[in-house]
Image (tube, rainbow, N blue to C red):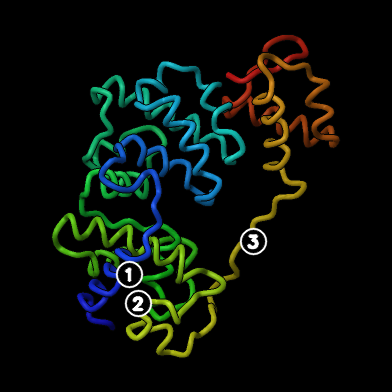
Amino acid sequence: MVAMSALHAPVLRWYDDHARELPWRGPEASAWSVMVSEFMLQQTPVARVLPVHEAWLRRWPTPADLAAESTGEAVRAWGRLGYPRRALRLHAAATVIAEQHDNQVPSAYADLIALPGVGDYTAAAIATFAHGRRHVVLDTNVRRVLGRAIGGVELPPASITKAEREEALAVLPADEPTAATWSVAVMELGALVCTASSPRCGDCPVADLCAWRAAGHPAYDGPPRKVQTWAGTDRQCRGRLLAVLRDSDGPVHRSRLDAAWSDEAQRARCVASLIADRLLVVAGPDTYALP
């Protein structure tokens, strides 16, 4: 196994030279900006998040500003980022922050994970990136980098294992500021260099320490990995239906939803699921609206 301290200096130096300038990074970024970014970046690329994040922070610069609006406006502003339930969860978390935390995003992991819609990763990420705390932050990019550099495997398991978490904790620098920078640096390395399908090992600052490279880049041999599809799925149907509501100033007639998706059975199923998820409400006998 690679000596843990040997990874720190080259990765941190690389990050100093190659980190992207993003609005939720840097000393001027508020904890709320970081929190919004973490919700938006879940399964959504940075390029798509950037304009929505900017508009969101301009309209709702604090949690209380968002909490004062309806959940429907949060869904509308979410636009086409996908997985719109994240907008509802962010609105719910903002309400709790405004009411119970004096409109300040908490810094303690325990307070963060108690917020609606905040799980282990998001709580650790906000505590780390917004407040400089020392936590294990395991997203897909971090898991891939550590899996290759330390574990010698091309891709991590589908779910986080106890061994992975212990490995990540072992390599985490001891002091909080360095640990926080390390966490974002490893994440950035995975996003820009140690990518899933076309890793640029020639540009990697720890290529000479990488166990996967030393082993000859063995191919992933674990269980088959799920490939997400989009065309024709309920996710696509739900997105089409929500787009009709987002682009309207008020309730829309059923006929507009019928025109948005031709499969009647699938459309009815997706309308029902949107209502169950509180992303859609029945406004009248034949009309629907955002909540």
| Label 1: how many Cα within 10 Å (few below 14, some 14–19, many 20+) | some
Q: Is residue 93 above or below residue 286?
A: below
Q: Residue at x 24, y 69 (%)?
A: 171
* Mark 2–mark 1 distance (CA, rounded to whole Å): 6 Å
Find the distance from the CA under tag 2 to the CA under tag 3. Answer: 30 Å
Q: Which residue is mark 1?
A: 14
Whole-percent x, y for residue 263 in the image: 84, 37
The x and y percentages for residue 137 are 32, 56
Left or right position of 255 against 179: right
Of tags 2 and 3, which is closer to the observer? Answer: 2
Local secondary structure at mark 3: loop
Label 2–label 1 contact, CB within 8 A: yes
Q: Earlier in the sequence, mark 2 or mark 1?
A: 1
Q: What residue is disc 3 on? A: 227
Q: Quadrant of the C terminus?
A: top right
Label 1 element class: helix
The residue lying toward the viewer, choosing from 130 and 225, is 130
Give the number of the disc on residue 205: 2
Label 2 neighbour load within 10 Å: few <14, some 14-19, many 20+: some
At a point 34% along the width and 26% down the height, the residue shown is 62
